[in-house]
Amino acid sequence: MTNTTPPVRPANGRVITLTAPAASIDEETSAPGCSACEPATRQVARQLPLFPLDGETIASRSEPVPLENPFSKYVVYVDESGDHGLEKIDGNYPVFVLAFCIFHKAHYAQQVVSTIESFKFKHFGHDLVVLHETDIRKEKGGFRFSSRLHREAFLGELTSIIDTSNFILISSVIDKIRLRDRRTNPYHMALGFCLETLYEFIEEKQQHDATTHIVVECRGKKEDAELELEFRRICAGDNKFGKVLPFEIVFADKKTNSSGLQLADLVARPIGLSVVKKISQTEHLTFSKANFSAPEAVCT
């Protein structure tokens, strides 16, 4: 049985009848105290379970709706290491590094994010902490552990996560001391190289007809405006291919708790150190060669 409210007539003249479904029950019932009433079968309302049952997913309960997806199968997270300024150069770290971490979206959503979230719950009790390389290295804030044993376990597990998170790494390292054209912006130079290399990868994967989003961290209103202008200039055709590149830039707030941005932050500085210490990029990433592809440019 259903309870039907009186018709509602809106201003446009259409009549809308609101029907409230009967309360759901688990078995056939008859109206109490009415011998003339035959047993009435009421439809059991289906509720979403708290957890999936026997491998059933919410998506599997309804027919999928085919949609044209204008986006590629990949997403890119970007971070840098070092100062891109040329006036004052740190002699201990005279490089600027730009790192592009390319993830297959399905793997990123189903494996990478859940692994990092579980890691945070294990070590911090919540998932709001942002994994920042500088804070971890200097043991700031929540990364000041109660014992060295805990810190070593944390670092070991984090290294393992990076090692087993399959993603493609494109990096560009600018040696600022050897940079001949002092008018050149190291960030823009590295950006051009990384975008061109990214396009070669996307074309190889036959995703160049779809849009790939590139997520970068906000640095400041002026810096972001300059970066976006340079990004759009390169993508509009000012590149070695002379083609329009199918990329869109997305700016993320520094407080954004993005697994991809955090991984990009964690790998950028070690890349720079490998160059500063005269260690080749190939040797530095030998332990994770199954996970990384790192075409590298040391621009002078």
Image (spheres, rainbow, N blue to C red):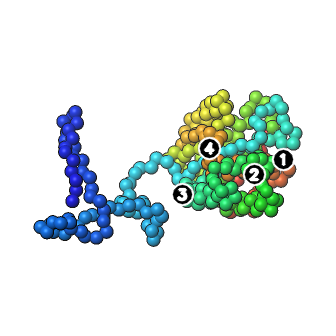
Per the image, label 4 sits on a secondary structure element best described as: loop
Q: Which residue is mark 2?
A: 143
Numbered circle sitting on residue 256: 4
Numbered circle sitting on residue 106: 3
Answer yes or no: is residue 71 visible. Answer: yes
Per the image, label 1 sits on a secondary structure element best described as: helix
Label located before the other in sequence (2 or 3): 3
Q: Residue at x 84, y 47 (%)?
A: 276
Against 27, residue 245 (above or below) is: above
Quarter of the figure that contains the N terminus: bottom left
How far apart, in angstroms, are the residues tagged by discs 1 and 4?
A: 30 Å
Q: Residue at x 83, y 40 (%)?
A: 94
Per the image, label 3 sits on a secondary structure element best described as: helix
How far apart, in angstroms, are the residues tagged by discs 1 and 3?
A: 35 Å
Label located before the other in sequence (1 or 3): 3
Q: Nearer the viewer, residue 298 or 266?
A: 266
Q: Nearer the viewer, residue 117 or 69?
A: 117
Of badges 4 and 2, the one in the foreground is 2
Of badges 3 and 4, the one in the foreground is 4
Q: Residue at x 61, y 34 (%)?
A: 228
Label located before the other in sequence (4 or 2): 2
How far apart, in angstroms, are the residues tagged by discs 3 and 4?
A: 21 Å
Q: How many marks?
A: 4
